Image (cartoon, rainbow, N blue to C red):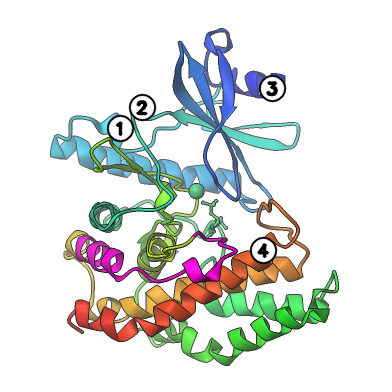
Amino acid sequence: MNELFNIAGHFIDQTTIESIEPLGNGLINDTYKIMVEGMPRYVLQRINNAVFTDVDMLQNNIEAVTDHIRQKYERQGVTDIHRRVLHFLKADTGKTYVFEDGKYWRVMDFIADSYTYEAVTPGYAYYAGRSFGDFESLLTDLETPIGEIIPDFHNIEFRLKQLDDAVAKDPVGMMREVEVQKLVYRIRAVADDMCLGERLYREGKLPKRICHCDTKVNNMLFDKDGNVLCVIDLDTVMPSFVFSDFGDFLRSAANTGAEDDPNLDRIHFNMEVFEAFAKGYLEGTKSFLLPIEKEHLPYAATLFPYMQAVRFLTDYINGNTYYKIKYPVHNLVRTRAQWKLYEEAVAKKEEMKRILSL
Ligand code: GN1
Ligand code: MG
């Protein structure tokens, strides 16, 4: 705890802090809220620098994105800007992060009276679609270059290659498990189809845009009436296909079960959430979305559970070195759940096309 108080002291007056408490369910960074006068006032985060190896680039990206959005809101006369876009504090080092004892930390303002959800109703999904669409739209004219903070982050060919490497090395002997072998087999059987996006890109047909790239439901703040206040967790903002934001939101929001649900019977793909989210997303992106991007949104809805299954299984085979886990087979349970969701999404592809009038 003392460590947290000392770190916070680089950003704010340490004597005003009442307590520092854990916040949220992120799988990568460690997040805390800093309590001042009985209220959460700031968010303190330890940046996982095994995942984000270039923290300077990371914070430059985030500052460029938040400054750009803030300026646009100012020009548009938006009144509650401090609730609509994240604001990172400068430390006594002049940067928006500090490095101490081998760890990186940052502090941002806490947005009061805001809520995060692990599941949403279709109504909320509509607002979320609109907000992620608006988010991409606001960034189409960003001139500051945004670095690819995790190279090939949503490149499924690369993720499959990582799986191949894990299978070949098999560092902890997981390939002895028949279930793991079967999952690898199933993943590989459809791999070519799932790499469609990368092929379209190489053929020069599909653009990359500045995307959020981690559009899980819980990366968005809502107000008490269900309106979206603010898009959060901006670490992975980088050039990607729009499929990233469309697909990853549905991966979490359209899943009727949990991301790591041990009961596969609970996992279905909710088409009402799909329809509402797609409506909002298409409205938000109407100024720039190309027909080829729209046409492949159903593919995106299947790609993200697939990619997440590949990533969770790879981590399981590697001995759980990337994602935080709560029990030894957590990554295997997550893989099963994501695979089930992938199958459910595939079964709904024709219906998705109908809804999108494709
Ligand atoms: C990670 O940190 P968090 O929980 O928002 C991951 C995402 C995965 C997600 C799976 C940098 O996001 O890509 O989709 O877990 N972020 C990174 O829940 O790998
Ligand atoms: Mg998050």
Mark earlier in primary sequence (4, 1): 1
What's the distance in space between the residues labelled 3 and 1, CA to CA?
A: 28 Å
Mark earlier in primary sequence (2, 1): 1
Mark earlier in primary sequence (2, 4): 2
Q: Position of residue 148 (x, y in %)?
A: 51, 60
Residue at 84% x, 71% y: name it: 171
Q: Position of residue 30 (x, y in %)?
A: 61, 39
Against 274, residue 184 (above or below) is below
Residue at 27% x, 35% y: name it: 224
Q: Position of residue 62 (x, y in %)?
A: 44, 44
- Which of the numbered marks, if any, corresponds to residue 316? none
**Kind of residue at badge 1:** Arg
Q: Label 3: which residue? A: 1
Residue at 58% x, 92% y: name it: 189
Q: Label 2: which residue? A: 112
- Which of the numbered marks, if any, corresponds to residue 331? 4
Tag 3–tag 1 contact (CB < 8 Å): no
Tag 2–tag 1 contact (CB < 8 Å): yes
- 176 left or right of 299 in image: right
